[in-house]
Amino acid sequence: MAQQILIIGLGQFGMSLAATLTSKGAEVIAADIKKSLVEEAASFVTESLVMDATDETELARLEPGKRDATVCAIGDDSKEASIICTALLRQMGSPCVVARANNPMHQRILQLVGAHQIVNPEQEFGKRFANRLIYRQLVADMPLGDGLHLSEITVKDKMIGKTLIELALPKKYGIMVVAVRRGTPSSVFQPTPDEPLKENDNLVLVSKEEAIKRLMEGK
């Protein structure tokens, strides 16, 4: 059975999230106070509604307690509305409330009113993109929690032709290679320790963030 996700706020973040979740098979119910945004989302989500998320009666009609998760994606235009909406969603029994924060103070308030998870898309993207600018071989980077990161890098020239045994990344850096991406179109597979790496291979890694920095800098 498909997960039902309620998204409130259809700015760039909310709209992108709604489209991506829909493409992954989720049933998305999307709401915003602006009719034009609701009409745009209507072309791909399960249901879209024009509503004021700070109106308790209107919000209750969406039955947040019956959805698998609810995202309050209200943007910079109304921090007060996002705080009220988040608090109401918790009161209405939503099992998982994810709230979008715009700054540290906003984040602290959202925590106080009960958000289960808080995201700051601009801040998180900025951190990841900064690493990609500094380390050009870093293709992707995603925090997993507890200081661990899932990263994808293109193999460095000195890695080509060497095996994972020879590279000894766990011993030298505390880095685990979980997959290799190879070819066009690409295929992803679990590497064997004695298979030489090829030019244009990508390595999918799990490690601490500082370990990737040391690897990229050859330390």
Image (cartoon, rainbow, N blue to C red):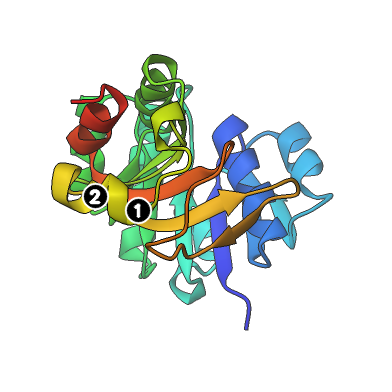
Residue found 55% across the figure and 35% down from its top = 13
Which residue is more in the foreground, 170 or 78? Answer: 170
Using the image, determine if residue 74 lies above or below residue 130: below
Q: What amino acid is at disc 2?
A: Ala
Residue found 43% across the figure and 49% down from its top = 204
Which residue is more in the foreground, 194 or 12? Answer: 194
Residue found 30% across the figure and 56% down from its top = 165
Residue 211 in view here: yes
Where on the picture, by quarter, is residue 216? top left
Disc 1: which residue: 164
Residue found 15% across the figure and 50% down from its top = 171
Neighbourhood count class around disc 2 (C-alpha, 10 Å): few under 14, some 14–19, many 20 upward: some
Q: Is the N terminus in the top left, top right, bottom left or bottom right quadrant?
A: bottom right
With 111 as the anchor, is 191 left or right in this view? right
Secondary element type, mark 2: loop
Q: Return the residue found at the far bottom.
A: 1
Q: CA distance from mark 1 to mark 2?
A: 6 Å
Using the image, determine if residue 23 lies above or below residue 118: below
**Label disc, if present, on residue 168 of the rendered structure:** 2
With 202 as the anchor, is 117 left or right in this view? left
**Label disc, if present, on residue 25 of the rendered structure:** none
Which residue is more in the foreground, 41 or 55? Answer: 41
Q: Position of residue 162 (x, y in %)?
A: 41, 45
Residue 88 in view here: no
Q: For the residues labelled 1 and 2, say whether their Cβ atoms are less than 8 Å apart.
A: yes
Q: What amino acid is at disc 1?
A: Leu
Using the image, determine if residue 160 lies above or below residue 216: below
With 66 as the anchor, is 27 left or right in this view? right
